[in-house]
Structures are given as structure tokens and as C-alpha cells.
Amino acid sequence: MADIVDPNNVRDPNSKSAAKKEAKRLEKEAKLAAKSAKAAPSAEKKVKAVKKDDTEAPFVNTTPKGEKKDLSEPMAAGYNPLAVESSWYDWWSAQGFFKPQLTADGKPKPEGQFVIPCPPPNVTGSLHIGHALTVAIQDGLIRWNRMLGKTTLFVPGFDHAGISTQSVVEKRLYKTEGKTRHDLGRERFLETVMDWKNDYQSRITNQLHRLGGSYDWDRVAFTMDPKLSKAVIETFCRLHEDGIIYRANRLVNWCIKLNTTLSNLEVEQKQLTGRTLLNIPGYDAKERFEFGVITSFAYPIEGSDEKIVVATTRPETMLGDTAVAVHPDDPRYTHLHGKFVVHPFVPNRRIPIVCDSIIVDMEFGTGAVKITPAHDPNDYEVGVRHNLEFINILNDDGTLNANAGVLFEGVKRFHARNKVVQLLKEKGLFVEVKDNPMQIPICSKSGDVIEPVLKPQWWVNCKPLAEEAIKRTRAGELLITPKQSENDWYRWLEGIQDWCISRQLWWGHRCPAYFVRIEGKDQETNDGKNWVVGRTREEATERAKFLAAGAPFVLEQDEDVLDTWFSSGLWPFSIMGWPDKTPDLETFYPCTLLETGWDILFFWVARMVLLGIHLTGKVPFNEVLCHAMIRDAHGRKMSKSLGNVIDPIDVIQGLPLEDLHQKLYEGNLDEKEIVKAKAGQKKDFPKGIPQCGTDALRFALCAYSGGGRDINLEILRVEGYRKFCNKIFNATKFAMLKLDGEFVPEPIAKPTGNESLVEKWIFHKLNIAAIEINQCLADRNFMAATIAVHNFWLYELCDVYIEAMKPMTDESASPATRKSAQQTLYTCLDYGLRLLHPFMPFVTEELWQRLPRRANDSTPSIMLASYPISDSDFVFEDAEKKFDLVFSTLKAGRSLAASYNLQTDIQFFIHAQADHEAELFQSQLFTIVALTKGCKSAEVVRQLSEIPSGCGGGVVTSSIAIHTLVRGLVDLDLEISKCEKKLDLARLNLQKIVKVESQPDYTETVPENVRAANDDKKKTIEAEIATLELSKSMFTELK
């Protein structure tokens, strides 16, 4: 029985919290279903031992590639995702269904257009489950919009991923051949990387096919294709000509391991709470170095016995110190203004004491700060303010150079750290070391500790670009969802820094910049004064002639390549042919939607917007949708060393544990990491990964997408949705039996109005589902969309209508009744499969192709069929209310029977007090019997005296109760005791509501709808008390 309605706590059942509860319930249901399947392997073995099941033989695809699957044979005994999903993709592609449909004059269709530039996966390796999420969401939206009649374009492509790809190929080269890229030379190494790229581009393409992405493969792009490379060169030259790109000798993030510069976004900050010993790439695995401490030492004052104490978290950087800063107002150091300290390890280096109120906090430490302008961002600014010397002490390979002094030249940086501390102690200059909570910069690619180093590089001045992007976004030209990502967007753009685009790699777009070496002239390479850029070498030569002013010169192209994100930032328009004015650029740019992970909102999305606006004058897409980050079931980030990185193909077709282990050897993990990863795999997948199929995987990933930042992926839930596919498959198979050979669907899918109550009800529910799903997809609420379509199929079509229609299609039913029920079933299957198609493309195509077609309907594929939308002809609100009442009553009857453990020969007596309700139930008795397993009969009674003695009862509404005969089947004393307890509770609840209604100001202060609800509640409780008293009385009489 429901609680009394509290006027202060009225909640909308269609709210977000209700949707979340439903999602949790579905997740629990899916897990239980999957676990129950796992729990019975021994039983399966026993069955197989007795009788071999030929239907479980491995599936062999006999359909020639690109041809339509032959469905003339009867449907298989059971759902096999590999069989169902075979052949359709090749047929779709061969038929050109993925290509944009244009009008006769080559324009987008009047229904509109929907364009997504696929975020190009890196060619570093195969796709992981996170990529499957992007395909599920993006292709779901593409298929939905295509079925809405729009011109759709889904452009596939691949990213060369400079640092990542070069790094993985170098690791593989060293692991397999013991060679470095320098052993091969630039040209041969690039050939090796291109071989890798071709291999993995082919693998990824196959994965995208298996995932069902409806990409236009004739437009596939690669960031280093000639067309896209032309766009990169044009962008560099144009931005340089506009003064946006410039060259400067500034601090960069240097990764020793990768030997290249990184942008700030590629550097992660590792939080330390205190003293921590860490392993560093490039050092012996047994060596660990101290971080999270601050070391204090003293500098001797020149010409004095006095010393000044400074502190640092990086003792080795003192070898590059060029100043000690004090606060100008600090009385402790007034007498040292203008003096010098003496460097203890670098002879003849005099270090000035400078006054700086910005860098120095008098209250922190000793109030004196060591300054290393060439190796610290804050110190760099001090160096600029005081015109200090910038001394670089670090070689590119992480060893110290001659500037560090003879004692340290050639020593590796962290060995030098230990040596500095040791020698300070020997000289009596060491003061102390203590814990210091801090962050250390870590390369997101290699795990190495980043070093700030001065290097001449090419930079993009992002400030003016960001200002325009902010202006356009605030003006509504760009929608960013979810809201949290929009807030992050503004915060980052408002604090944007210049972007270093030089990378010291071989794999990538080489900078189209040339140093003009003029004969007989002493030139500086650090700034841009002696550099020219050119779209071609010829253009660069002409510009160099002007610079050289007639003197002989040699052009030397910059050895560096450009940051990968520079070319990726051009993606939405370079794939359309920019800088050329192509038909694609004119028709499909700007794009409609950019869907990606929130973690690359700044790496990639922001740069596309900055460059797109500046180069094309348009925001490159109308909407940015950020999806969640997929983590494992324990909430951990996916990591190869943890063994929790999942290949979507393994989920689609299943993989035994041993094969899962074997895949670890395909990567670059060392033996220790492989052992750790195997343990993780064994814990998470003790029996391997079960075969789930693409449709179940896509549906599950969409069902997880409810707007949060993280998804903890549970494979059991994916397996649970395979069972949903099985339900759809079997329901359609059963329905096909009901649609006999003589069945012909009506020319149009419109109800006649003469349908039975349950038919009108299912039409109404179908229309509600269509409205909800369309709205949810428009709102990008994929979780709610999957709940709506799941509920329609499972709880309305399968559990109710298909069961209720069985007697309507029996031989005893009239031809008119049978035909109407068949037409309704056909329409629900047809539209239900269409509603489901964006999420489950393969099983819906397979089943839809088996349905007969309406007259004059030549639609070749479900993906081109129209998507169901709201239709007033399907609205039957009165029928919905009536059948919901019938359904509520039969559910109450089911619960009543279950409470008495009745499973067969169930007899229901429905006590209906109102004439119209009695008439309704009288007309639906066959439905109540059909939808209640084990029900023998159902009867409508108008008087309590008509209810046979020995019945237990339950109330449905204040005017409806349902009773079932239990005479001779129950413990009478126990049932009387149950009735008494329920009566006590019901009377208590009645007292509560009477108390609420008896308040002096009840009528004036409580809203009318709440008062009406309370009044109805009171009547229902009173009816429940009457029913319980009747049951108690009957049980008592039988004693």
C-alpha cells in the first residue's frame, strides 16, 4: 500500500532522479541475468554430454562480400550475434547507404543536414573500449538523423599522433631488433613508421566496421595525406604572415625520454605529500630518487665570512643559478643589496644579490630565493626583469653540460642531484632537508620527469584567438554540453598561454620554416629575424632573396616537426578540402556536432575553434558534446600495465582468458608488467570475456551515458544486454509465426480506431516511446533514450501485448479480430525495430528484413526507413487509462497469487463496484487470464456475497478489489494472523491521513490536487480494510 501523500513532498515520476533509479534497476537486472548465466556451466556440460546441439556449431559466413544476406531460410533456433551481425556492414557500404543523400541539384535535403567529423583515432595501436563509446554515440546520432530524412555525413579518418606513434615504434624497434631510430636514419625510420601506420590503420578500420559506424569511407582522411598536409603548411604560413606564429627562445617542457618539447597540456602534475622515492625512465630499475623534499644550503657572500641560506626542491639546478633574490624591504638583507655570492662548484661565477618584491615572500623560509632563469618558469620572469644571465646546464639527453662545471659535466641530472647534496655537506654548506608537499611535472606519454629548458621554438600567440572564441561562444554560436565542460571551456580560454608547436621528432609535418644562412654574416638562430616561411621551397627562396639583399645564402629547413594537435586542430575543415574552395567545404562546413571526451576539450576542441574561426571565419561546429571517461569496473583508469584495457572486438566475439593473456605480448610491456597485467585480467575476467555482440555493446555504452564524467564499465552488464537482444530476436521469431503466410500489412501504418483495448494501449505506448526517444536524443540523453526503448520492447510489447494477443490470434478468434491483432503486431515490430536501430543496427536490420513490406514501400534498408515520431493517430489516452487499470488489477492479482504460492489453477474474482468498471473488466477477462501464468479463470462480481468463501483478497482502488480462491491450500491460522497485522497497519495509516485532514487550516493551506490525492488515498485504505476484514472473516468461518 502506498504512503499517505505529503503535501510538502510531491515528486514528478518522470524526473531525472526517477530515470536514474530506472537505470540502476536495469543495471542490477542485467548483472543478475549475466551472473545466473555464469553460474550454470556444469549444467550446460551435462546437457551437451547427453545430446549434441548442432545449432551451436561455429558460424560460417557464406554471403559473398558486399552482397545482401539470404534470409529465405527459417530463423535460427537461438540468437547468435556473430551470425546476425555478419554481412550487413559490407552490404550497407556497397549500396552507398553511408554516403550523404543530396537533392537533384546537389544540395542538402530540405529536412536539414547533420555532419559529424569523426575524431580521428591515433594509429599508435588498436581501438579500446573508449573508442567504442564514441562510435556508439556518434553513429547513433548519425543513424537517427538519417532516418529523420536529413542529409548526413560521417567522415572517418586517422591521426598520425607524432609523439605517441614515434615512441611506440621506437620501443618496438629496440625490443625486437635492439636498434634506435638513429641506427636506421631518418628516411628508413619514417618508412618503418609508415608500415606501422598502414598496419594499424587497417586494424582500426576493421574495428570500426565491426562496431557498425556508418562512415562515408570514400572521404576517409589521414592527417599526413597530401590534402591535409597542404592545409597544415597553409596554416603555418598564414599564421606567420598574420603575426600569430613567432619564433622565440623561451622555456619549454622538455621530456628527456622522448627527447622533445611538450605543450603544457601534455604534462601531468603528480601530487606528493612529502618525501617520496621514485623510479625514473632511463635509469636502472633498482635506482630510486628523492622527491617531495626541500633542501636548504648556504651561499658564501663574496669578500665576507657571512652566508645566505636558500632552499630548493631541485638541488641540481643550483649549478645554473645566476642570482639570489631578497625582498627590498627585508631589513635582514639590506646590507647585502648589490653584493655577490660565490658559487661553490663553478669557479669565477659571481652571483648577484637582487631585490625583487614579486618572487620573494619575506615570511617564507629564510626570505632569500635562488634564481635559475634557464630552468624555472618563475625564475625566468625574474631573469627578464633584472636582465640576468640565462645559463642552460642541461643537454638534451638529460646529462649536464659544461656550464655546470667540470665536476658535473656529463653526469645524469638525478645523479647530479645526489652529488650536489653530497658536496655541499663536504663543504659545510648543507643546512637541512625536510618534507615538502609538492607537485612534480610528469610527461603524460613516457612518465618521465619534465625539465624546463630554454629552447628556440615556434609559438602561437593564442590570446587574440581565444578572445574571439570566447566572444563567439557567449554569442551562442557554439553550444558545449554538459554544463560543467562549458565552465571549464571559459576558464581555460580566459587563462590561455602561448602554444609551443615545435617538436623534436621525425614523424610528423616538418615545419615549413627555413633559416636563411647568409654568407659572411654572423647570425642568430634563436629569434625569427633570419627565418622565412614558404608554402613551397620556391616561395621560401623568393622571400630569402629579399632578406639576403643580394648576398649569397643557403636555405636550411627547420629539422623540427609540428605538434600533432596543430594538424588535428584543422580537422573539421581540412577534411572538407580547405584551403581549396571545394563543394564539400561549401556544403558540409561548418559541421553540426563534434563529439569527444571531456579530457581533450583543450588539447583538441579548443584549438579547432581557435584555428577554425581565424582561418575560415566560422566556428567549425555548432555543438560540442563531451562524453564520459570509461574506467574499469573498479573505477580505475584503463591501463595496459593493469591489464584492464579492453579491445571492443573481444567483447563483440568473446575471448578466453588464455588468449587475453597472450595479447599482452603484442605490446611493449616488459615481463614484470605482463605478470601484473595477467593478474588483473584473471581477477576481472576469470573465464575470459563473454561473447556479447556489437549491438549489446553499443546499447550498453549508450545506457551508461547519463551525463557524468566517468563510466565504470561492467562487462556483465553488456552481457545482460545480449539477453535483451535475445529477447527481441525470440519475440520477433514468435511474432513471425503469428503473421502467417496469408498476412499482408496494410498500405499505411495507421490504426483504424476499431482495435481492441490492448491494441489501442500498445499504439499509445509506442507513440509515447517515440516522443521520449526523439526528445532524449535531441537532448543528448542517451541513458534515458535507451531506458525508453528498452521499456517499450521488454515491458510493453513483449510482456504485455504479445502475450495478450495470443488468444486474439487463436483459431477460435474471429477473422476480423485476428487480422486486427496481426496488423497491430506488425506495426509495433516495424516501428519498434526502427526506434531501436540507432543503438542496435545489426539485429534490427536482420529482423526488419524478415518482415513483409507494405504496398509501395521499396525502402531497401531499415537505416533508410523513416524514424517514428509523434503521431496523433496513435494517441489513445482513454484506452491507456482503461488498460492501465486492467493491468494494475492483474498485477495485484499476480502478487496476491504469489503471496499464497499459487502457481496453477488460479481463480480470480474481481469485485468492481462501478458499472463502467465492471463492464471494462468483463471485456478484458481473456486478457487477464492470458497475462497471468497459471490462471485458470477470471470472473467479475458486483457484490461481496458473490465472492466464494475461502478467498484471499487485495485492494486495487477504492472501488476495485481482486480475490483468489485459496480454500484448502493455506494455513488458516497463519492467514488470519497476516490479515490482523495488515489490518493494524491499514488502520494506523488511516488514522494518519484523518489526522492530516482534520487540521484546522487544511482546506486553506493544502493545494487542491494534494487534498484530492489524500481523499482518494483514504478511500483506498478504507476499501483495503473492508477487503481484509472480509478475508479474515472467510478464513475464520472455514476453521
Image (tube, grey):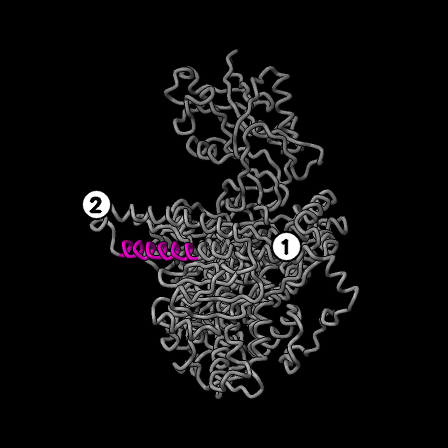
Would you say residue 189 sits in the magenta stretch?
Answer: no
Q: Which residue is mark 2?
A: 1000
Callout 2 crowding tier (Cα within 10 Å): few <14, some 14–19, many ≥20: few
Stretch of the chain drawn in magenta:
1009-1030
Q: Position of residue 963 (x, y in %)?
A: 46, 62
Rendered location of residue 162, percent (x, y): 59, 54
Q: Residue at x 58, y 67 (%)?
A: 727
- Determine whether the residue tagged by mark 2 lies in a helix, strand or loop: loop
Residue in front for this viewpoint, 701 or 127: 701
Q: Position of residue 133 (x, y in %)?
A: 54, 59
Are dots 2 and 1 in contact, CB under 8 Å?
Answer: no
Local secondary structure at mark 1: helix
Q: Amino acid at mark 1?
A: Lys
**Badge 1, how many Cα within 10 Å: few under 14, some, many 20+?**
some
Q: Which residue is mark 1?
A: 35
Instruction: Give the Cα separation between the discs numbered 2 and 1.
Output: 56 Å
Q: Closer to the N terminus: mark 2 or mark 1?
A: 1
Front: mark 2 or 1: 2
Decide: is 641 above or below 14.
Answer: above
Q: Is residue 990 visible?
A: yes
